Amino acid sequence: MTPELKKELELLALKIRIGTVECIKSRGFGHIGGSLSVADALAVLYGAVMNVDPKNPKKSDRDKLVCSKGHAGPAVYAALALKGYFSYEELKTLNQPGTNYPSHCDCNKTIGVDMTTGSLGQGTSLAVGMAVGDKLQGIQAKTYLIVGDGEANEGQVWEAAMFASAKKVTNLVWLIDWNKKQLDGFVEDILEPFDFEEKFRAFGFEAVTVDGNDVEQLYEALTRSVTDKPLAIILDTVKGKGVPEIEQAMGNHSMAVSAEVFDGWLDGLRQKLKALEA
Protein backbone atom coordinates (compact mmCIF):
# COMPACT_ATOMS: atom_id res chain seq x y z
CA MET A 1 0.00 0.00 0.00
CA THR A 2 1.33 3.41 -0.91
CA PRO A 3 1.49 6.15 1.76
CA GLU A 4 -0.95 8.17 -0.36
CA LEU A 5 -3.57 5.41 -0.43
CA LYS A 6 -3.15 4.75 3.29
CA LYS A 7 -3.78 8.39 4.11
CA GLU A 8 -6.75 8.52 1.73
CA LEU A 9 -8.37 5.52 3.42
CA GLU A 10 -7.65 6.79 6.93
CA LEU A 11 -9.29 10.08 5.99
CA LEU A 12 -12.30 8.24 4.58
CA ALA A 13 -12.61 6.13 7.75
CA LEU A 14 -12.64 9.31 9.84
CA LYS A 15 -15.26 10.87 7.59
CA ILE A 16 -17.39 7.72 7.90
CA ARG A 17 -17.13 8.01 11.69
CA ILE A 18 -18.18 11.67 11.55
CA GLY A 19 -21.07 10.81 9.24
CA THR A 20 -22.12 7.97 11.52
CA VAL A 21 -22.20 10.19 14.61
CA GLU A 22 -24.05 12.94 12.73
CA CYS A 23 -26.55 10.37 11.47
CA ILE A 24 -27.26 8.98 14.94
CA LYS A 25 -27.24 12.45 16.53
CA SER A 26 -30.17 13.41 14.28
CA ARG A 27 -32.28 10.80 16.08
CA GLY A 28 -30.71 11.23 19.51
CA PHE A 29 -29.94 7.55 19.99
CA GLY A 30 -28.80 4.54 18.02
CA HIS A 31 -26.39 1.65 17.51
CA ILE A 32 -23.20 3.65 17.67
CA GLY A 33 -20.65 1.18 19.07
CA GLY A 34 -20.86 -1.47 16.39
CA SER A 35 -21.21 1.15 13.66
CA LEU A 36 -17.95 2.86 14.60
CA SER A 37 -16.04 -0.43 14.89
CA VAL A 38 -16.58 -1.23 11.17
CA ALA A 39 -15.80 2.23 9.79
CA ASP A 40 -12.28 1.25 8.74
CA ALA A 41 -13.48 -1.88 6.95
CA LEU A 42 -16.12 0.13 5.10
CA ALA A 43 -13.52 2.73 4.14
CA VAL A 44 -11.25 0.10 2.60
CA LEU A 45 -14.11 -1.72 0.88
CA TYR A 46 -15.75 1.34 -0.66
CA GLY A 47 -12.57 3.38 -1.00
CA ALA A 48 -10.25 0.86 -2.62
CA VAL A 49 -11.53 -2.69 -3.02
CA MET A 50 -15.12 -2.99 -4.21
CA ASN A 51 -16.14 -2.67 -7.85
CA VAL A 52 -19.14 -0.34 -7.52
CA ASP A 53 -20.56 2.66 -9.35
CA PRO A 54 -22.73 5.17 -7.46
CA LYS A 55 -24.10 6.40 -10.81
CA ASN A 56 -25.22 2.85 -11.65
CA PRO A 57 -25.92 1.25 -8.26
CA LYS A 58 -27.67 -1.81 -9.72
CA LYS A 59 -25.09 -2.72 -12.36
CA SER A 60 -25.07 -6.48 -12.75
CA ASP A 61 -21.34 -7.07 -12.26
CA ARG A 62 -20.97 -4.93 -9.14
CA ASP A 63 -19.43 -6.25 -5.95
CA LYS A 64 -22.00 -6.45 -3.18
CA LEU A 65 -21.99 -5.75 0.55
CA VAL A 66 -24.25 -7.54 3.00
CA CYS A 67 -24.05 -6.03 6.47
CA SER A 68 -25.65 -8.92 8.35
CA LYS A 69 -25.26 -6.94 11.58
CA GLY A 70 -27.87 -4.64 10.12
CA HIS A 71 -27.88 -2.31 13.11
CA ALA A 72 -24.59 -0.92 11.77
CA GLY A 73 -26.68 0.73 9.07
CA PRO A 74 -25.62 4.29 10.05
CA ALA A 75 -22.00 3.50 9.15
CA VAL A 76 -23.05 1.90 5.87
CA TYR A 77 -25.18 4.97 5.07
CA ALA A 78 -22.28 7.29 5.85
CA ALA A 79 -19.98 5.32 3.54
CA LEU A 80 -22.56 5.36 0.75
CA ALA A 81 -23.19 9.10 1.13
CA LEU A 82 -19.48 9.86 1.02
CA LYS A 83 -19.16 7.63 -2.06
CA GLY A 84 -21.86 9.71 -3.76
CA TYR A 85 -24.89 7.43 -3.77
CA PHE A 86 -27.06 10.14 -2.22
CA SER A 87 -26.85 13.50 -0.48
CA TYR A 88 -24.85 13.63 2.73
CA GLU A 89 -27.61 15.72 4.32
CA GLU A 90 -29.99 12.78 3.99
CA LEU A 91 -28.05 11.01 6.74
CA LYS A 92 -29.76 13.35 9.18
CA THR A 93 -33.16 11.73 8.57
CA LEU A 94 -32.25 8.43 10.27
CA ASN A 95 -35.34 6.56 11.42
CA GLN A 96 -37.59 9.58 10.89
CA PRO A 97 -41.10 9.22 9.40
CA GLY A 98 -40.83 8.67 5.66
CA THR A 99 -37.06 8.28 5.72
CA ASN A 100 -35.06 6.16 3.31
CA TYR A 101 -32.62 5.42 6.14
CA PRO A 102 -34.10 3.08 8.76
CA SER A 103 -32.10 1.96 11.76
CA HIS A 104 -31.34 -1.35 10.01
CA CYS A 105 -30.29 -1.76 6.37
CA ASP A 106 -33.16 -2.01 3.87
CA CYS A 107 -32.43 -2.49 0.16
CA ASN A 108 -35.99 -1.43 -0.71
CA LYS A 109 -35.40 2.01 0.79
CA THR A 110 -31.72 2.95 0.55
CA ILE A 111 -29.86 3.38 -2.73
CA GLY A 112 -26.67 1.33 -2.64
CA VAL A 113 -27.77 -1.14 0.02
CA ASP A 114 -27.62 -4.58 -1.58
CA MET A 115 -29.62 -6.60 0.96
CA THR A 116 -32.09 -6.00 3.76
CA THR A 117 -30.73 -7.19 7.12
CA GLY A 118 -31.45 -6.89 10.80
CA SER A 119 -32.68 -10.26 11.97
CA LEU A 120 -29.31 -11.50 13.15
CA GLY A 121 -27.82 -14.45 11.34
CA GLN A 122 -30.02 -14.26 8.27
CA GLY A 123 -27.65 -12.03 6.31
CA THR A 124 -25.15 -14.89 6.19
CA SER A 125 -27.43 -17.18 4.18
CA LEU A 126 -28.49 -14.29 1.97
CA ALA A 127 -24.88 -13.34 1.19
CA VAL A 128 -23.93 -16.92 0.38
CA GLY A 129 -26.94 -17.16 -1.92
CA MET A 130 -26.03 -13.93 -3.68
CA ALA A 131 -22.46 -15.12 -4.24
CA VAL A 132 -23.67 -18.49 -5.55
CA GLY A 133 -26.09 -16.69 -7.88
CA ASP A 134 -23.27 -14.64 -9.38
CA LYS A 135 -21.18 -17.78 -9.93
CA LEU A 136 -24.03 -19.59 -11.64
CA GLN A 137 -24.53 -16.64 -13.97
CA GLY A 138 -20.82 -16.32 -14.71
CA ILE A 139 -20.68 -12.85 -13.16
CA GLN A 140 -17.19 -11.90 -12.01
CA ALA A 141 -18.12 -10.22 -8.75
CA LYS A 142 -17.56 -10.69 -5.05
CA THR A 143 -19.95 -10.54 -2.13
CA TYR A 144 -18.57 -9.08 1.09
CA LEU A 145 -20.36 -10.12 4.27
CA ILE A 146 -20.02 -8.37 7.65
CA VAL A 147 -21.11 -10.39 10.69
CA GLY A 148 -21.01 -9.38 14.34
CA ASP A 149 -19.22 -11.49 16.92
CA GLY A 150 -22.32 -11.63 19.09
CA GLU A 151 -24.34 -12.43 16.01
CA ALA A 152 -22.15 -15.52 15.58
CA ASN A 153 -24.16 -17.05 18.45
CA GLU A 154 -26.80 -17.80 15.81
CA GLY A 155 -26.76 -21.33 14.43
CA GLN A 156 -27.67 -20.07 10.99
CA VAL A 157 -24.25 -18.39 10.78
CA TRP A 158 -22.49 -21.73 10.91
CA GLU A 159 -24.94 -23.48 8.60
CA ALA A 160 -24.20 -20.81 6.01
CA ALA A 161 -20.45 -21.15 6.60
CA MET A 162 -20.65 -24.93 6.15
CA PHE A 163 -22.55 -24.53 2.87
CA ALA A 164 -20.17 -21.86 1.54
CA SER A 165 -17.20 -24.10 2.17
CA ALA A 166 -18.79 -27.28 0.83
CA LYS A 167 -19.82 -25.53 -2.40
CA LYS A 168 -16.50 -23.65 -2.72
CA VAL A 169 -18.09 -20.22 -2.83
CA THR A 170 -14.77 -18.51 -3.46
CA ASN A 171 -16.33 -15.19 -4.47
CA LEU A 172 -17.49 -14.73 -0.87
CA VAL A 173 -15.41 -12.75 1.62
CA TRP A 174 -16.68 -13.11 5.19
CA LEU A 175 -15.72 -10.47 7.75
CA ILE A 176 -16.30 -11.01 11.47
CA ASP A 177 -16.43 -7.80 13.51
CA TRP A 178 -14.76 -9.11 16.66
CA ASN A 179 -15.31 -6.07 18.86
CA LYS A 180 -15.75 -8.23 21.99
CA LYS A 181 -19.11 -6.79 23.13
CA GLN A 182 -22.74 -7.42 22.31
CA LEU A 183 -26.05 -6.01 23.49
CA ASP A 184 -25.84 -7.00 27.15
CA GLY A 185 -22.21 -7.72 27.93
CA PHE A 186 -18.93 -9.18 26.78
CA VAL A 187 -19.21 -11.83 24.08
CA GLU A 188 -16.96 -14.27 25.94
CA ASP A 189 -19.16 -14.05 29.05
CA ILE A 190 -22.45 -14.55 27.24
CA LEU A 191 -21.44 -17.41 24.95
CA GLU A 192 -17.74 -18.07 24.48
CA PRO A 193 -17.06 -18.06 20.70
CA PHE A 194 -13.60 -19.63 21.10
CA ASP A 195 -11.03 -18.86 18.40
CA PHE A 196 -12.84 -17.51 15.34
CA GLU A 197 -9.88 -18.10 13.03
CA GLU A 198 -9.52 -21.74 14.09
CA LYS A 199 -13.27 -22.23 13.87
CA PHE A 200 -13.49 -20.93 10.29
CA ARG A 201 -10.55 -23.09 9.28
CA ALA A 202 -12.37 -26.09 10.75
CA PHE A 203 -15.35 -25.16 8.59
CA GLY A 204 -13.14 -25.22 5.49
CA PHE A 205 -12.35 -21.53 5.04
CA GLU A 206 -9.09 -19.79 4.49
CA ALA A 207 -8.91 -17.55 7.56
CA VAL A 208 -6.81 -14.68 8.84
CA THR A 209 -7.02 -12.30 11.81
CA VAL A 210 -6.11 -8.64 11.36
CA ASP A 211 -6.33 -5.38 13.25
CA GLY A 212 -9.76 -4.38 11.99
CA ASN A 213 -9.13 -0.72 12.75
CA ASP A 214 -5.95 -0.59 10.63
CA VAL A 215 -6.62 0.24 6.98
CA GLU A 216 -3.30 -1.18 5.79
CA GLN A 217 -3.88 -4.60 7.36
CA LEU A 218 -7.44 -4.60 6.09
CA TYR A 219 -6.36 -3.77 2.55
CA GLU A 220 -3.73 -6.51 2.51
CA ALA A 221 -6.25 -9.09 3.74
CA LEU A 222 -8.99 -8.01 1.34
CA THR A 223 -6.73 -8.04 -1.71
CA ARG A 224 -4.98 -11.34 -1.08
CA SER A 225 -4.97 -13.94 -3.82
CA VAL A 226 -8.06 -16.13 -4.15
CA THR A 227 -7.69 -19.82 -3.28
CA ASP A 228 -10.15 -22.68 -3.74
CA LYS A 229 -11.75 -21.77 -0.41
CA PRO A 230 -13.95 -18.87 0.73
CA LEU A 231 -12.06 -16.31 2.82
CA ALA A 232 -12.87 -15.34 6.41
CA ILE A 233 -11.23 -12.23 7.85
CA ILE A 234 -11.54 -11.79 11.60
CA LEU A 235 -11.45 -8.09 12.40
CA ASP A 236 -9.92 -7.49 15.82
CA THR A 237 -11.72 -4.21 16.53
CA VAL A 238 -12.71 -1.88 19.35
CA LYS A 239 -16.40 -1.21 19.80
CA GLY A 240 -16.95 2.53 19.49
CA LYS A 241 -13.53 3.01 17.88
CA GLY A 242 -12.57 6.65 17.36
CA VAL A 243 -14.48 8.19 20.25
CA PRO A 244 -12.78 7.44 23.59
CA GLU A 245 -15.92 7.97 25.68
CA ILE A 246 -17.80 5.42 23.60
CA GLU A 247 -14.91 2.96 23.55
CA GLN A 248 -14.80 3.00 27.37
CA ALA A 249 -18.55 2.76 27.93
CA MET A 250 -19.84 -0.68 28.84
CA GLY A 251 -23.27 -0.08 27.37
CA ASN A 252 -22.07 1.17 24.01
CA HIS A 253 -24.17 -1.12 21.83
CA SER A 254 -26.91 1.50 21.56
CA MET A 255 -26.63 4.87 23.27
CA ALA A 256 -28.93 7.82 23.92
CA VAL A 257 -27.14 11.05 24.85
CA SER A 258 -27.75 14.78 24.60
CA ALA A 259 -27.02 16.84 21.50
CA GLU A 260 -24.23 18.52 23.45
CA VAL A 261 -22.51 15.17 24.05
CA PHE A 262 -22.83 14.26 20.38
CA ASP A 263 -21.34 17.65 19.49
CA GLY A 264 -18.39 16.98 21.78
CA TRP A 265 -17.75 13.66 20.07
CA LEU A 266 -17.97 15.33 16.66
CA ASP A 267 -15.55 18.06 17.72
CA GLY A 268 -13.01 15.41 18.70
CA LEU A 269 -13.39 13.55 15.40
CA ARG A 270 -13.15 16.74 13.36
CA GLN A 271 -9.97 17.71 15.16
CA LYS A 272 -8.48 14.32 14.23
CA LEU A 273 -9.56 14.86 10.64
CA LYS A 274 -7.98 18.30 10.52
CA ALA A 275 -4.73 16.96 11.95
CA LEU A 276 -4.63 14.10 9.44
CA GLU A 277 -5.38 16.43 6.52
CA ALA A 278 -2.51 18.76 7.49
Image (cartoon, helix red, strand yellow):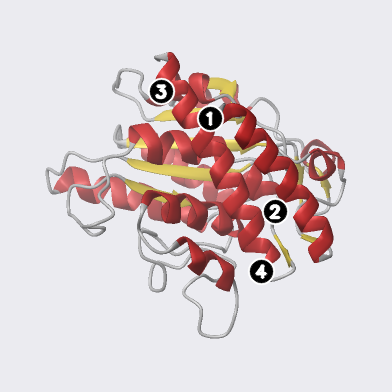
Q: Is residue 139 placed above or below 29 in the rendered structure? A: above
The kind of residue tagged 1 is Glu
Which quadrant of the figure has residue 277? top right
Q: Nearer the viewer, residue 40 or 267?
A: 267
Q: What is the distance, in whole Å, between disc 2 and disc 4 at their CAs? A: 12 Å
Q: What is the distance, in whole Å, between disc 1 and disc 3 at their CAs? A: 9 Å
- Which residue is located at x 44 percent, y 64 percent? 116
- Which residue is located at x 45 percent, y 46 percent? 160
Residue marked by disc 2: 32
**Label disc, if present, on residue 26 of the rendered structure:** 4
Q: Earlier in the sequence, mark 3 or mark 2?
A: 3
Relative horizontal placement of residue 194, taking residue 73 as reference (left or right): right
Question: Residue 206 location in percent, x, y?
Answer: 43, 22
Q: What is the distance, in whole Å, between disc 3 and disc 4 at their CAs? A: 31 Å
Report helix, strand or loop for mark 1: helix
- Disc 2 residue crowd, few under 14, some 14–19, many 20+, Cα 10 Å: many
The answer to whether residue 211 of the structure is visible from this angle is yes
Q: Is residue 126 placed above or below 188 in the rendered structure? A: below
- Which residue is located at x 58 percent, y 39 percent? 14
Q: Are marks 4 and 1 in contact (CB under 8 Å)?
A: no
Which quadrant of the figure has residue 39? top right
Q: Earlier in the sequence, mark 2 or mark 4?
A: 4
- Disc 3 residue crowd, few under 14, some 14–19, many 20+, Cα 10 Å: some
The kind of residue tagged 3 is Leu
Residue marked by disc 1: 10
Q: What is the distance, in whole Å, between disc 1 and disc 2 at their CAs? A: 19 Å
Question: Residue 103 location in percent, x, y?
Answer: 59, 67
The kind of residue tagged 4 is Ser
Q: Are marks 3 and 2 in contact (CB under 8 Å)?
A: no
Report helix, strand or loop for mark 3: helix
Q: What is the distance, in whole Å, between disc 4 and disc 1 at their CAs? A: 25 Å
**Label disc, if present, on residue 5 of the rendered structure:** 3
